[in-house]
Image (cartoon, helix red, strand yellow):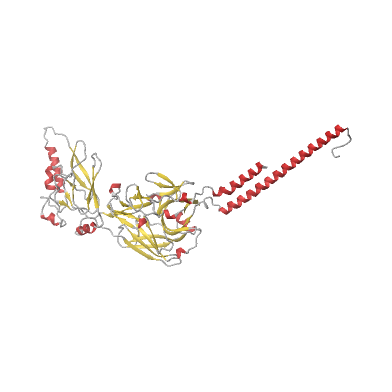
């Protein structure tokens, strides 16, 4: 009997607790929030890998990195600073501030770009207007075909600089000068430059030493050197005279502040003594690009939805006269699988396709900007599929165009994946549940999250910006392309309730049925065992009776008697 009851107890324990196994305690769910990391990305059209910096203590002041230090570039553009979308702030290169907060683990800094422009009569005022925003600028010297690591020099904004002596080597070649990345012109070491309003770079130019001719004359080499020096001098901007590098016409094109030549003891002294006195006596004016001011477009919405107005702040120069186009989408009209699931499941409170027209034509490229929904408050009372949820703005992106970190799953565990390093780290606060070939997001504790992304399908990443309060009058999200933007409800919970597609109450009913069946089987076995034991007992009694009758000499009795 004891063995039978042990078996019954084991069945009861297994079938009662299996559905709830693997659910962590609240303490296990909450990740550490005392530090945060900064994730740098090159932004739309920029080149370079995502870089994660940190950790930093929450509440500490952080100095952001230079875009050039991270190797970020965008052809025809220069970096103006960083957009911290999760905090709604923009910082200049090397800007500082208290960036992290106690509800953020990752703060994404996206490089902001503006088109390179030519110098104009307004360049002086442009430079002065930018001086209050920028703090420092960096001049990078690259070896070109030579050997050596790039050299970076940092200056306070408004401070002029002078080209350094050549620190690189190139066997059987002679250093000619520095090629300016903005203009393509070559300048000698020691040349002075007015302060630019962004980071700039120069590349070393070399000439072959050549071979002495048959007569042994070295005039060819001298001529080549002289020609290079002449070419370098004549390639300066037109503000300098071709006959002399310091005429009055040059000074009239410079800002009112004068620039003195560098001291001879400076670490940036001129190695080519023959050109130092001439090149340092004039100062090259760096072309200052036109600064693009973001454009804000608006579109009013009417209907029985929480959104009353949509604003789109465009942060790139895409042309003149842009206009905003807004189209409501449903599960029949949308083609993106992740967006279709939000709508089909009833999790989307508002869903729109956003387009921009330039001179009446649809803009087809990627576009950096911020989408803002103005809300009427009904989002706080909307019905939901979940007992607990959090509101969020979401934006679907083709995975090939997304270069940041995102959450993904292998079917059992969820990871934070960094494509740049192909690194995965397991997380417990987020679960991705596969339903109909698309992953649905479940958050255990929204207080530890703000802006992030997750892989919803093989070709789609969903960017998420959580809304801290359901009664907020507006919600926004940074976007990098024109694709569906939605206001949605995201489930808050353990995620175990939907991981197998079977509700907990069904598991309980199954467990009860199994336990009852086990008890019935046990009772049947017990009854069968009792019957066998009784039959054996009766058989022993008959044998004993026969023995007694035989020993007493009594015969004629059968078993029945």
Q: Evaluate whether residue 359 shows in this view.
A: no
218 vs 501, nearest the viewer: 501
Q: As drawn, which residue projects farthest toward the bottom?
A: 302
**Can you give x and y, in whole percent of width and height, for residue 506 in the image?**
58, 53
Please name the residue shown 12% across and 55% down the image: 249
In the rendered image, which quarter contains the C terminus?
A: top right
Q: Is residue 38 left or right of residue 306?
A: left
Q: Residue furthest front?
A: 552
The quadrant of the picture occupied by the N terminus is top right
Residue placed at 81% from the left, 37% from the top? 542
In percent of width and height, residue 357 lies at: 35, 61
Residue 97, image x and y in percent? 31, 54
Question: For the image shown, how many numbered marks are present on the structure?
Answer: 0
Q: Quadrant of residue 351?
A: bottom left
x then y, percent, for residue 352 = 42, 61
Give the quadrant of residue 548: top right
Residue 107's place in the image compared with 373, above or below, is: above
Q: Which residue is drawn at the image coordinates 83% and 33% (left, top)?
A: 547
From the viewer's perspective, is 464 left or right of 166?
right
Specify whether residue 136 is in view. yes
Indicate left or right for 47 with 553 as reference.
left
Q: Nearer the viewer, residue 41 or 21?
A: 21
For this view, does 240 lie left or right of residue 554? left
């Amino acid at each position: 009997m004891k063995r039978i009851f042990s078996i019954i107890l084991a069945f009861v324990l297994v079938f009662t607790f299996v559905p709830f196994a693997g659910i962590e305690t609240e303490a296990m769910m909450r990740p550490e929030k005392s530090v945060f990391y900064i994730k740098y990305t090159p932004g739309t059209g920029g080149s370079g890998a995502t870089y994660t910096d940190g950790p930093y203590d929450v509440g500490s002041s952080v100095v952001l990195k230079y875009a050039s230090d991270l190797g970020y570039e965008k052809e025809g553009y220069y970096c103006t600073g960083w957009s911290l979308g999760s905090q709604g702030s923009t910082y200049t290169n090397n800007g500082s501030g208290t960036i992290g907060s106690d509800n953020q683990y990752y703060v994404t800094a996206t490089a902001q770009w503006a088109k390179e422009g030519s110098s104009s009569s307004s360049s002086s005022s442009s430079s002065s207007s930018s001086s209050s925003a920028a703090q420092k600028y960096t001049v990078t010297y690259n070896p070109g075909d030579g050997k050596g690591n790039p050299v970076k020099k940092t200056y306070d904004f408004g401070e002029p600089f002078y080209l350094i002596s050549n620190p690189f080597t190139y066997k059987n070649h002679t250093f000619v000068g520095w090629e300016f990345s903005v203009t393509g012109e070559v300048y000698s070491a020691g040349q002075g430059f007015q302060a630019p309003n962004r980071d700039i770079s120069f590349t070393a130019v070399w000439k072959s030493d050549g071979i002495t001719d048959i007569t042994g004359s070295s005039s060819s080499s001298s001529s080549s050197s002289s020609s290079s020096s002449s070419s370098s001098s004549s390639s300066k901007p037109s503000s300098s005279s071709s006959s002399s590098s310091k005429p009055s016409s040059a000074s009239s094109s410079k800002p009112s502040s004068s620039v003195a030549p560098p001291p001879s003891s400076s670490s940036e002294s001129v190695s080519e003594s023959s050109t130092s006195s001439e090149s340092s006596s004039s100062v090259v004016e760096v072309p200052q690009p036109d600064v693009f001011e973001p454009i804000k477009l608006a579109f009013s919405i009417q209907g029985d939805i929480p959104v009353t107005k949509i604003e789109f702040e465009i942060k790139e120069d895409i042309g003149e006269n842009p206009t905003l186009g807004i189209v409501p989408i449903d599960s029949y009209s949308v083609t993106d699988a992740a967006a279709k699931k939000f709508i089909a499941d009833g999790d989307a409170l508002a869903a729109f396709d956003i387009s921009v027209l330039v001179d009446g034509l649809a803009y087809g490229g990627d576009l950096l900007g911020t989408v803002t929904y103005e809300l009427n408050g009904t989002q706080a009372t909307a019905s939901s599929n979940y007992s607990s949820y959090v509101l969020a703005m979401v934006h679907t992106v083709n995975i090939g165009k997304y270069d940041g970190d995102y959450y993904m799953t292998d079917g059992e565990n969820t990871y934070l994946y960094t494509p740049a390093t192909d690194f995965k780290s397991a997380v417990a606060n987020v679960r991705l549940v596969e339903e109909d070939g698309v992953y649905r997001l479940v958050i255990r504790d929204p207080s530890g999250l703000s802006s992030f992304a997750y892989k919803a399908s093989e070709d789609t990443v969903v960017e998420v910006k959580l809304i801290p309060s359901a009664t907020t009058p507006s919600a926004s999200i940074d976007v990098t392309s024109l694709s569906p933007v939605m206001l949605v409800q995201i489930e808050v919970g353990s995620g175990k309730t939907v991981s197998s597609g079977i509700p907990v109450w069904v598991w309980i009913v199954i467990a009860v049925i199994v336990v009852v069946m086990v008890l019935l089987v046990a009772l049947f076995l017990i009854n069968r065992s009792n019957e066998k034991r009784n039959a054996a007992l009766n058989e022993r009694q008959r044998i004993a009776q026969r023995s007694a009758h035989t020993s007493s000499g009594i015969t004629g009795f059968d078993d029945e008697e």
